[in-house]
Amino acid sequence: MFREQQPCWEDMFRIRAPLDRERAAKSERVALSKEELLTEAGIRRLLREAKRLYRCADEKVAASLLMKRYAHPLAGGGMHAFSRLGQLLDPDKWSFTLILDASGDIHVLGEPELEPCWGEPRSLARERQIELLFKGHFNRLFQLMNQVSGISIKVLWANVANVLEYYYDLWATEAHTTAQELLLQEDRDGVLHEAAGALYGQYEANPLAFTYTVIPHPAQDGNMLRIREVCCLKFRSEQGLHCTTCPHITERQRADICKLYQ
């Protein structure tokens, strides 16, 4: 299964087979096993290098920018497994290594462990996937990030939500049938809005449920831009640039920033 799906895993989510370790090692700055990642010592090591790579004076900013990147392989990959492959991805059963490379990008080495979920109601399988992925992995990681850096856990959840909104937008455009579109929308609504907070950890409400303001893209005719509810703190890095979706800038500033990314 992994060999068949490998181009997708690698191109979209930067998830590579363990044999790619030599290729990754040429540019790696930090390599942490999953077990090391979920420790205070591992987080401190990761943040120390991230601060340098992202030119942050503040560990909170480094933590946020790291999680914006980490959400792609883990949250994006996990929901891809469920919504598009019909399988569950359990990080606890997945032996992987996180690689932070010299450019600040994150790669994951290790074949994802997927479990078929056919035969049970989709709503129940989706709840199980949410609990495995978000309560079992992301919530634990976010608690550690908060303890070490002081970063608001809400900022970290907002980063994950923004990444998942991006992927569900993309997957909707790639759906081949109306039935596929409807299932994707069900999953999107479930994971990002309707699922109970307890499935994600010690939350009364869904921590991925954010509101967005959607506007026409200032630099791309026909495209839309989803303005975030919660800032990712990127502007506090040395570069000082805001994201195109930052909630704290004027529309004139947003248009100028969008031109920089053209």
Image (cartoon, grey):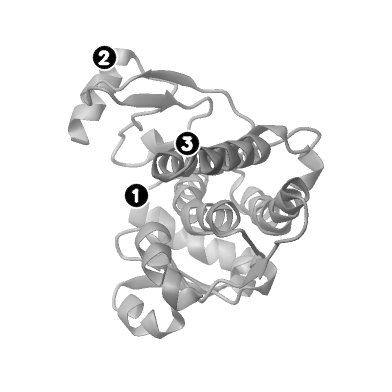
For marks 1 and 2, give the one nearer the viewer: 2
Give the Cα separation between the discs numbered 1 and 2: 26 Å
Q: Residue at x 72, y 49 (%)?
A: 122
Q: Which mark is residue 55?
A: 1
Mark closer to the chain start, 1 or 2: 1
Q: Residue at x 67, y 69 (%)?
A: 115
Task: Mark 2 or mark 3: name the one nearer the start of the chain.
Answer: 3
Identify the residue under disc 3.
232
Mark closer to the chain start, 3 or 1? 1
Q: Is residue 16 visible?
A: no
Q: Neighbour class for label 2 at 10 Å: few (<14), some, many (≥20)?
A: few
Task: Give the x, y percent position of residue 109.
Answer: 46, 74
Are dots 2 and 3 in contact, CB under 8 Å? Answer: no
Residue that numbered label 2 is attached to: 252
Assign a secondary structure to mark 3: loop
Look at the picture and state if 132 lies above or below 111.
Answer: above
| Three-letter code, disc 1 | Arg
| SS for dot 2 | helix
Q: Residues within 10 Å of mark 1 (few under 14, many from 20)?
A: some
Q: Would you say 148 lies left or right of 80 here?
A: right
Q: Amino acid at mark 3?
A: Cys
Image spot of residue 94 (x, y percent): 62, 73
Give, as a three-letter code, the residue at label 2: Arg
Could you say where residue 71 lies in the image, as x and y percent from the top left?
51, 52
